[in-house]
Image: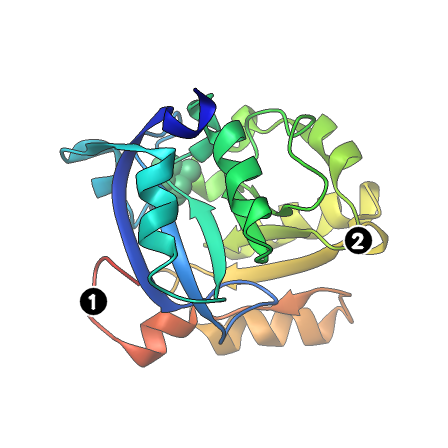
Amino acid sequence: MASDALLEICELFYSIQGESSYAGYPCFFIRLAGCNLRCTWCDTRYAYEKEHQSYSISRIVAELNKYPGVMVEVTGGEPLLQRNVYPLFDKLLATGRIVLLETNGSLRLDNIPEKVVKIMDVKCPGSAMHEKMDFDNFEFITPKDEIKFVISSRADYTWAKQLVSSYDLSTRATVTFSPVTSRIASPELAGWILADYLPVRLRIQLHTILWPGRTRGY
Ligand code: SF4
């Protein structure tokens, strides 16, 4: 029975949404275990390096229901690696909540239910994973979705700027640029965006301001 399908879970937690147009809202996070990429600056290695736990979908929804009405985000790792994420989406949407999906941009987005808000990462060269991106996924992005670039250098910025222009990404969805704060300062990235009149939103991870030093469960 689909509602009892199992998923490998890294962690379930309740926090403030910190990295999208929904930043600032209370949110229940479902972090699925496993990832097919190895970004050089990854800050969630525990999603694929540490032990994880099997949860049935009905148990996940029971955990979610402890937090009445809040939005829910499915993240990872890379959540689309687990095929049971699809019946999970259906159950989450059936609760009537806003459902967000954060995905690393390497796997096809053609089967995501329409009502799920997709936050698609585009990995820049500084991640060493840029060749894994599936740019055909831009076809499945709709105006409610988001395309997120994580920028670790001026070279990443230039690469991302060219991609935004060549695929006209700002007309497809909200495009965000976020700094890898261990490599570039946020004001530096802000200055580049301003100088180029770039139609993208600077996004700074809210949880790093709220809870500096916390490494998981945010
Ligand atoms: S896709 Fe995400 S979880 Fe996977 S290696 Fe990159 S940053 Fe880490």
> x, y percentage for residue 163?
72, 43
Colour option used: rainbow
At x 59%, y 60%, the residue is 177
Label 1, secondary structure: give it: loop
* Residue 71 visible in image: yes
Q: Nearer the viewer, residue 38 or 193?
A: 38
Instruction: Examine the image and state in which quarter residue 152 appears.
Output: bottom left
Image quadrant assignment for residue 47: top left
What residue sits right under mark 1 in the picture? 214
User: Image point 75% across, 66% down: which residue?
Assistant: 198
Mark 1 and mark 2 residues within 8 Å of each other at the beta carbon? no
Pick whichever of labels 1 and 2 is earlier in the sequence: 2
Q: Amino acid at mark 1?
A: Arg
Disc number at residue 38? none
**Other-residue count near label 2 (Cα within 10 Å), few / some / many at <14 / 14–19 / ≥20:** few
Q: Nearer the viewer, residue 205 or 130?
A: 205
Q: Amino acid at mark 2?
A: Pro
* Residue that numbered label 2 is attached to: 143
Q: Is residue 167 left or right of residue 211?
A: right
Q: Position of residue 159 (x, y in %)?
A: 64, 45
Circle 1 Cα neighbour tier, 10 Å, few/some/many (<14 / 14–19 / ≥20):
few
**Distance Cα–Cα, label 1 vs label 2:** 33 Å
